[in-house]
Image (cartoon, coloured by chain):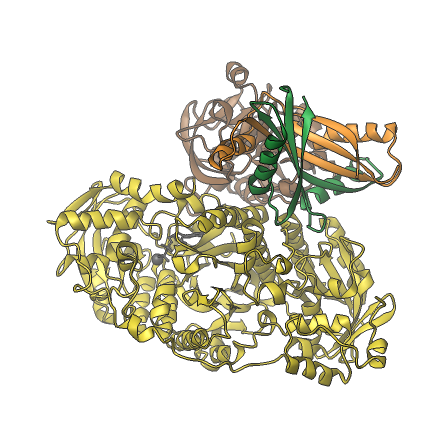
Chain colours: A brown, B green, C orange, D yellow
Amino acid sequence: MVRVGVVTFPGSLDDRDALRAVRIVGAEPVALWHGDAELHDVDAIVLPGGFSYGDYLRCGAIARFSPVMGEVIAAAKSGMPVLGICNGFQILCESHLLPGALTRNGGLRFTCVDQGLRILDTSTAWTSAYSTNQEVVIPVKNGEGQYVGDAQRLYADGHVVASYLGRNPNGSVGDIAGIRNAKGNVVGLMPHPEHAVDALTGPSTDGLGFFTSVLSSLVGA
Amino acid sequence: MSGKRVVVDVMLKPEIADPQGQAVADALPRLGFSGITGVRQGKRFEIVLDGPVDDAVLDMVRKAAETLLANPVIEDFTVRLEED
Amino acid sequence: MSGKRVVVDVMLKPEIADPQGQAVADALPRLGFSGITGVRQGKRFEIVLDGPVDDAVLDMVRKAAETLLANPVIEDFTVRLEED
Amino acid sequence: MSLDTVDHARATPDDEQPFAELGLKDDEYASIRGILGRRPTQTELAMYSIMWSEHCSYKSSKVHLRQFGEKAPPQAADVLLVGMGENAGVVDVGDGYAVTFKVESHNHPSFVEPYQGAATGIGGIVRDILTMGARPVAVMDPLRFGAADAPDTKRVLPGVIAGIGGYGNCLGLPNIGGEVVFDPSYNGNPLINALCVGVMPRERIQLARATGEGNVVVLLGARTGRDGIGGVSVLASATFEEGDESRRPSVQVGDPFTEKVLIECCLELYDRSLVVGIQDLGGAGLTCATSETAAHAGSGMRVDIEKVPLREASMEPHEILASESQERMLAIVAPTDVDDVLAICERWGVLATAIGVVTSTGRLEARWHGEVVVDVPPASLADDGPVYERPMARPADLDALQSDPPSELRFTRPSSGDELRATVLQMAASPNLCSRAWVTQQYDRYVLGNTVLAMPHDAGVVRLDDSTYRGLAIATDGNGRYTRLDPYAGAQLAVCEAYRNVATTGARPVAVTDCLNFGSPEDPEVMWQFAEATRGLADACLELGVPVTGGNVSFYNQTGATAINPTPVVGVLGVIDDVRRRVPIGVPESGLGVYLLGTTRDEFGGSEWAHEVHGHLGGLPPQVDLAAEKRLGAILTSLAGDVILAAHDLSDGGLAQSLVESALHANSGISVHVEGDPFVELFAESAARAVVLASDEDALLNACAALGVPVRRLGVTGGDAVTVDGLFSIPLDELRAAHEGTLPQLFG
Ligand SMILES: Nc1ncnc2c1ncn2[C@@H]1O[C@H](COP(=O)(O)OP(=O)(O)O)[C@@H](O)[C@H]1O
Ligand SMILES: [Mg+2]
């Protein structure tokens, strides 16, 4: 069975939700601990949402130095699929696995809304289940989700994975909601697909695709 | 007197808890930085003005610091002129 | 050399948007403060060390600023010694 | 000054002590001397002054709150696992699950420093829930502010909302509901109440008991600083006059990250059965936690104060014992488990320090570097404080108020289609009825993945955990205007509305928590309001079969001699056996029948219409009919999810407002036909009513007939407007612009 690890940092909040999403698509969820430099033979990794270390300094700045992150960075560089959601995206940027940075929302307020997104790149390990330009609705909830970086270049290189539709909730440059690395195994996403996996508790089930994608990319590999 | 700016430093009063500074103080030794006994984290505002910075202007900035930039219930501030 | 502390100022690079500074710049004229052409908001860290502050210590703080206190992708920092 | 030890106090019986400055009355001081058989030490005096303050001792309210126990309904025996008097009551919700919930106020601190005051309000109520053994699973925030356009509201509201979000979001707790009410009565006295609910396996319930001689007293969490020293007595029990620097408390800054790891750490300690007893540190800090745990266990305790980890090294023993530093818990641990406890704390990065032991002396002793500075019977602090029967008087202006209803004679009522249309739009856009999205979008509603209904539904509904479909529902309500006009009825209407809101979502109401926000108990008219309101609350809970499990009293909400409108805020907890049957306020299906359940009367006293359109308060509040509420609740609960596809209760603003909210949520129109006086039909605030959308008319009508619930078909869903036949039609876009524009315009 495909093993997908979800790292819990002190202050991680959506770790249980990510584990649940992994379980729902039929993969084996594996809880990873920030303090253990050990990946327990997982095939893919999710860095979940939350406020690691309270997000007091900068989001993700302290978590990036956790013992487990050395392993995550090495695995990412060797091609293992890694998805950073919200705080996880911030950690990936702080770790320089993804370019740019996430800063305070343009409106200066934490914002939780059901957000329309367009999936732009379906070539990654995490988005292959979508069709190009597919429109989905997934919750976004963050206080520091404004992506800053070289949007032109990211678009030119095809590295923008998803963009906001309609109102841009945080002022991200180029309406960027998610990006990937050159190889396509590392994806960072501000919206929370793990909160759109069950119509009972989310606005849609549109988030399932991120988890089914990784499953099929690993089974197919 | 252009090329100058006014800087307002805002720090939590010493008796007020500073979780942000504490988080940094806790993290630094883990990264191998030693000998640090305390960290306080505050805000720094750099204010650029369109005319010469005289005492009246500094007074105005002080007033602005008091009303908007700092929260006098929990924070102290200092105002000073700085070369660019 | 006790009674001294090291101050690290961290500011967003000039080309990075600063919504907090902008909000302050927008609010000031509404409160009747005029002549302000721009505000940038950053962070100020006051670091207290348990020994004398020599060049080696300042170097260490500079290293800490580079790795942890600032994100060089979007921020600049300065390190300096300050009297209490 | 040298250390005031117990020996020194014995040797210097005549030393003068500043008891009056600490808020103790002459006779209270005398009785402390009587209890101890000597003068108290400085540290003891500080402890008594805090524990005997209004906030900690409930000295003015105790005699009234007793009714909640005395009039507890028979259902209490079946559902309550832990009753009143603990940190929070615990309710059996079936399948081996227990739920604990409580609402509390943080009014004064939030007025002084809105962000931190509101944030630490969330932090405090969450620790109350954690203490019971539960995982906190959701928060709610019933809020009341001065007039929407008052300068003080502009100062306070944004910070309060940001603080509640800042703390709750960072803890990973979904916010599933609350209230935002504006009324000039709260100018200068905003009511910032916070509710938390938690879930646990039944057998994990923890109690605040220091049992077992030799067990170790372990302090968990944040370092202790000079936070809110004397805050409990000075801040929470006395009116705070702005500009009075000397009484300005040191504001407490919340640290949600520390609280988050404290939660995870405590839950692991519970799951591994490593604590014998546990108590959160809230008001009165260590003083309260040590004395209550020892008193409730009938044991004793010895604490070495210098072991407490400090933020400021210069703190004195009385400051350490009085400090209200946030994010701390006190655990009682068997000596053989201490190492395991410390290891778990270390893994979570939680500071943990053994500071004392449980004894069998029946005394609470505290030493400062070996010298005894406290030696008191713990119950004298925790339980045996003063109790007052305060004088009461019916407000002198009440007859005049009650005999001034907003009748047809006093105010012209809208009657033409155009007038009614304009009134619907005005009401939908009014500060009290407009969309709360500006607020609720600042709160995470999704985290933990169990939220089934949140804003804008009538109650928040969460699944107990993701291995079950069993869920809980909570709503909070209160109406200061109704309660001002008739405190007995007003309190009952608050219970009724929360009860109805819970039932509307398909849950069965089972228990109550309340936060009683009033003016000064030293004012006989306020005390009368308080007595009437508690009596009304207790009587309503008895009749409805929902026991009060706990709550909080907040007095001294007043400016000068003017008290706020008396405002009991009531939270009702419901159980829903299968959350897949939950009922939203609207669904986007066309062709569903729209029905009105309940009886509409010409009731406008204290109504939103009188307030919004005429700035008027007078007359009597709507009639209370507890039996009708029960019947309505039974229909809503039993038909939820199959016959009833959507439902919305009728309250502030009446039928018109409910139809507007339902249609906007579903983004699908509604057309209705009203009989009788359209103004009364659309805007009256008669209680015990709801609008439901149903597909199976016969099933609905039969059920209503069987239970004797009046029901009338109003119309049908569909289209893209809210239409009242023959009178007016308002496109949804126009309604939405009115409804959603108000708060952003007011607060940015
Ligand atoms: N401060 C708040 N925090 C969270 N939710 C709120 C708040 N204020 C209002 N709400 C939500 O907005 C909706 C409308 O509120 P309200 O009109 O007071 O409800 P009701 O009339 O059913 O009691 C409800 O879902 C309520 O829980
Ligand atoms: Mg309602």
Q: Where is residue D651 in the image (x, y as percent from the top left)?
A: 31, 60
Q: Is residue D4 above or below residue C1?
A: below
User: What residue is rendered at 58% in x and 30% in y?
Assistant: A102
- Quadrant assignment, res D535: bottom left
Judged left or right of residue D518, residue C83 is: right
Residue D671 in view: no
Measuring from the top left, give residue B26's x and y in whole percent.
Answer: 75, 43
User: Horizontal and vertical percent for residue A14?
Assistant: 56, 43
Quarter of the figure with residue C71: top right
| Figure quadrant of residue B56 | top right
Assign the C terminus of chain D to one quadrant of the image: top left
Identify which residue is drawn at 50% across, 17% down: A155
Vertical placement of A202 versus D703: above or below?
A: above
Res. C2 in view: yes
Where ligand 2 lies, by image quadrant?
A: bottom left
Q: Is A162 rendered above or below residue A62?
A: above
Residue A5, position in %: x, y?
Answer: 63, 38
Vertical placement of residue B7 versus D295, above or below = above
Q: Nearer the viewer, residue D674 or D727?
A: D727
Q: Quadrant of the N terminus of chain D?
A: bottom right
Q: On the picture, is D509 further left or further right than B47?
A: left
